[in-house]
Image: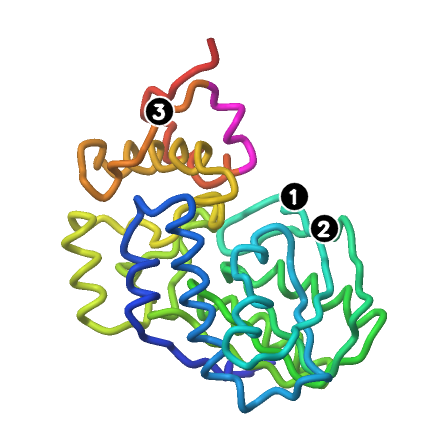
Amino acid sequence: MDVRPRLFLVHNTALEDLLFDRNLTGVEFRRACLRSSRHFIAHLADEFTPGDTAELMILSKGLVYQLGEATAAETGHNLPANLIATSRTAVSGGDASIEVQYACLEAPAGTLLIGDTVASGATITAALRCYTDSHSVRRVYVLSYAGTLSGATRITEFCARHGIEVTFLYGLAAFGLGDNGFDLSFLHPKTITRTAYADRAREQFSGRPVSAVGWDFGSQCMAPHKYRRLSWLEARIWGLTDAECFAAAEEPREMSDLAHERAAYEHALQNLTAPTDP
C-alpha cells in the first residue's frame, strides 16, 4: 500500500531548546516538554471537538508529553485519557517487535491524541490495533517531538486499512532512522529538516550523526541516572567523551542497568572495551 503521511513540521524555540540540548534533564526537561506540547495543542485547538476527543497515552513515555495539562492550559478543556502499556521485545534495524502488556480504554472518543516518539512506528501501530479492537475512531493526531518519516508511513498504512484519518505534527524534522533502530539524527541522509538545523547539529556533534533525543526518550526526567549513563555510551561510541554536548554523561557502574537499550549500542561496542560488571 502506497500511502503518503499527512505530516507537518512544527518550528518554535521550545522545540529547539528540547532537541538541541542533550544535557537537559530533570524538571527543566519536563518544562521544555510541556512548552513544546502546548505549541502542538495550540496548532490543533480548532480541529478537535471537546467531548469527543481523548488521549491514547502510551506508557510510560506518553507521560512526558503532558497532553492533558497542555490541553487544559491552551483550551480550558479537560482531555480524558486512555492508558496502554507496551513492551519492546526486539529491535532489528528499522523495525521493532511490540507487545501490549496492559490497557485501560475507558474514555472512547472519535478523535485520539497520541504523544510519543516515533521510530519504526511499531509502538503506535500496536497501540491503535489494541484500541480499535474495542472502540471505533475516526481521526488520530500523532504529536511527536522527534519522529521518522518511515514510522509515519507505517502508521498511515495501518490507519488507511482501518478507515482512520491520521495527521502527524513533528518537531523540527522528519528524521531518518539509524541502523540500530534508535538514532534520530539531524545528520541522517534521509532526514528532512531546515538546513540551519542540520548545520547546527553538525557543529554541536562534530559531524557525528548523534540522536537528537538519545536512546530512551523521557528518561531525562523519569530515570535521569539511566539517561546520563546511556549518554556516556553514546559519547564513547561517537568519540565525543570530552564534548560539551555530553557534559552530563556519567559512566555506568553496571551494564545490566542498560540492558533494555542493548540493541542501540551492542554492535557499535564490539570493537571497544566496554565497562563490565564488578
Image location (x, y in percent) of residue 26:
42, 44
Image location (x, y in percent) of residue 80:
71, 71
Q: Decide: marks 2, 3 in contact (CB < 8 A)?
A: no
Task: Name the image quarter holding the N terminus.
Answer: bottom right
Q: What whole-number distance in Å separates the C-alpha atoms at marks 1 and 2?
A: 7 Å
Image location (x, y in percent) of residue 100:
74, 53
**Quick one: label 1 or label 2, which is nearer the N terminus?**
1
**Quick one: label 1 or label 3, which is nearer the N terminus?**
1
Question: For numbered disc 2, what is the local secondary structure?
Answer: strand
Question: For numbered disc 1, what is the local secondary structure?
Answer: strand
Magenta region, residue range: 254-260
Look at 41% across and 66% down and name the residue there. 35
Q: Decide: marks 1, 2 in contact (CB < 8 A)?
A: yes
Q: Which residue is mark 2?
A: 99
Q: Which residue is mark 3?
A: 251
**Quick one: label 2 or label 3, which is nearer the N terminus?**
2
Look at 42% across and 36% down and name the residue there. 265
Q: Is residue 214 magenta?
A: no
Query: In this view, which residue lies farthest toward the top?
Result: 278
Q: Which residue is mark 1?
A: 89
Given the image, on which type of amino acid does mark 2 rest? Glu
Image location (x, y in percent) of residue 190:
34, 66
Question: From the viewer's perspective, is 85 left or right of 245?
Answer: right
- Pick the front one: 85 or 187: 85
Given the image, on which type of amino acid does mark 1 rest? Thr
- Pick the front one: 276 or 112: 112
